[in-house]
Amino acid sequence: MRIVLHEAVSGLGNRGDLVEVSDGYARNFLIPAGRAQQATAGVEAQAEAMRKSWQLKNAKDREAAEEIAKLLVARSIMIPARAGAGGKLFGSITSADIVAAITAQTEIELDRKMLHLDESIRTTGSHIVTAQPHTDVQFPVTVEVFES
């Protein structure tokens, strides 16, 4: 069955894409969930408009993410924390703490899900955290944790 996607579906396509899927997948999952619509001539024209608007929005989001990257790569984010002997923290620094520090120091709003930490920071010193505000833009953020 030929369908038009109303939203991005992983492994299938983005909003406005015309895709061919099995009849059962379309009738039992995509269409009832409001994620797709069966393709007709009118719907295909509408899909083209959706695709163009999605591409414009995606380009704007990418430019904004690149501007954020330029600002954050050049800086170190300073985070004070209580620490014991050997620089071991009492507790840990999470992605939410890093986002709060970025907002306070640079006035850049990020979502904590944009930061990728393998595990929480538990020692003082310099740490590299990967930020991905857009699917095509990924950059390192230097986080300096010091004893307060």
Image (tube, grey):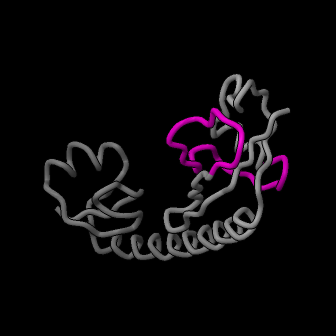
Total numbered badges shown on the rendered structure: 0
Q: Position of residue 92 (x, y in %)?
A: 66, 29
Q: Is residue 29 magenta?
A: no
Pick the front one: 14 or 147 = 147
The residue sitting at the front extreme is: 86
Q: Residue at x 85, y 32 (%)?
A: 148
Q: Residue at x 14, y 53 (%)?
A: 23
Q: From this view, report whether residue 126 is shown above or below residue 132.
A: above
Pick the front one: 135 or 51 = 135
Q: Residue at x 56, y 58 (%)?
A: 132
Q: From this view, report whether residue 71 is shown above or below residue 45.
A: above
Q: Position of residue 65 (x, y in %)?
A: 64, 66
Q: Quadrant of residue 124?
A: top right
Q: Position of residue 47 (x, y in %)?
A: 39, 70
Q: Quadrant of residue 117?
A: top right
- Left or right of 103 in this view: 99: left
Q: Residue at x 55, y 63 (%)?
A: 138
Q: Position of residue 101 (x, y in %)?
A: 78, 44
Q: Quadrant of residue 147?
A: top right
Magenta residues, as a range?
Answer: 103-127
Q: Quadrant of the N terminus?
A: bottom left
Pick the front one: 7 or 12 = 12
Q: Is residue 118 magenta?
A: yes
